[in-house]
Image (spheres, helix red, strand yellow):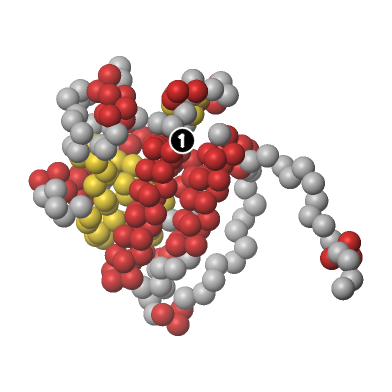
Amino acid sequence: MRKRRLVIAISLLSALSFLSTGITKAEPSFDQMARHILDVVKAFRAAYTLQVVEHTKAGGMSPREDWEKDPHFLPLPAQFVKAAAAQVGGLEIGLISLTPLNPENKPRTSAEVDALMQLSRDRLRGFISFVDGDQFKAVSADLGFVRSCIDCHNQHPQATRKNFQLGDMMGALVVRLKQDRVPSRPSDSMLPGEPPKRPPGTLERLTPPPTTAPPSLSDEPIM
């Protein structure tokens, strides 16, 4: 089961790393790429929630905020998203809410608050992109689609709202990118250089080292 969780986490990191290098213009390109990024994040989180968190309940596994303390605990879906997104350079992916359990997930600016309010009023819209100071941002409505997620929020001791129902908008996913990271012309688009060295992140620490080396070409029989 731990291998399945690692496969999903590594796949999310690979997808986000690929998508983060594809932004080449300002509004039109960023709007389209932000939609793709947020769709990927939602898809992998849904897979993690349904195929890992929900599937392993019968085996005694459970999602916990302090999941690192016990091998029978799993990261909460929100923690899974933030841990994976933290490995991606060049942009920032987070969660925001008007009633967050974690104070770090409060909207950072009045524009983010306004985006949440617009998405809450118009449920069919689902997505907003805008310029906020020196950043391009995109916000996608985050709906409660699993009963256990709804119950966790409603019963949490730090919850300021305790009446969420299935299908309610509980917050949003947000992508933030500095304007100077977006090339002004398509010809300016280049592959990023080698990233700076950094200590291993949470998901990298969970990845077991290889147990055997791959066979060398010299070991293969000559036909």
Indicate the quadrant where residue 216 lies: bottom right
Q: Secondary structure at mark 1?
A: helix
Q: Is residue 49 left or right of residue 166?
A: right
Quadrant showing the N terminus: top right
Identify whether 49 is placed above or below 116. Answer: above
Nearer to us in this view, 220 or 27: 220
Q: Is residue 178 above or below residue 68?
A: below
Image location (x, y in percent) of residue 15: 48, 57
Asked if residue 76 can be seen in this view, the reply is: no
- The residue located at (30%, 17%) in the rendering is 157
Residue nearest the observer in this picture, 94 or 15: 15
Question: Residue 219: where, in percent of width, then height?
Answer: 89, 61
Q: Whole-percent x and y of residue 114? A: 17, 47
Query: In the rendering, at what x and y percent does residue 176 appear?
Result: 36, 54
- Tell me which residue sits at (36%, 35%) in the image: 104
Eyeballing the image, is 100 above or below 34?
above
Q: Residue at x 48, y 65 (%)?
A: 21
- Left-right relation of 96 to 64: left
Q: Which residue is at 14% across, 44% downward?
A: 120
Say which amino acid is labelled 1. Val
Foreground of the two, 219 or 83? 219
Q: List the single residue furthest toward the bottom.
A: 187
Quarter of the rendering occupied by the C terminus: bottom right
Q: Which residue is mark 1?
A: 52
Q: Residue furthest left?
A: 121
Q: How many residues crowd mark 1 within 10 Å: few (<14), some (14–19), many (20+)? A: many
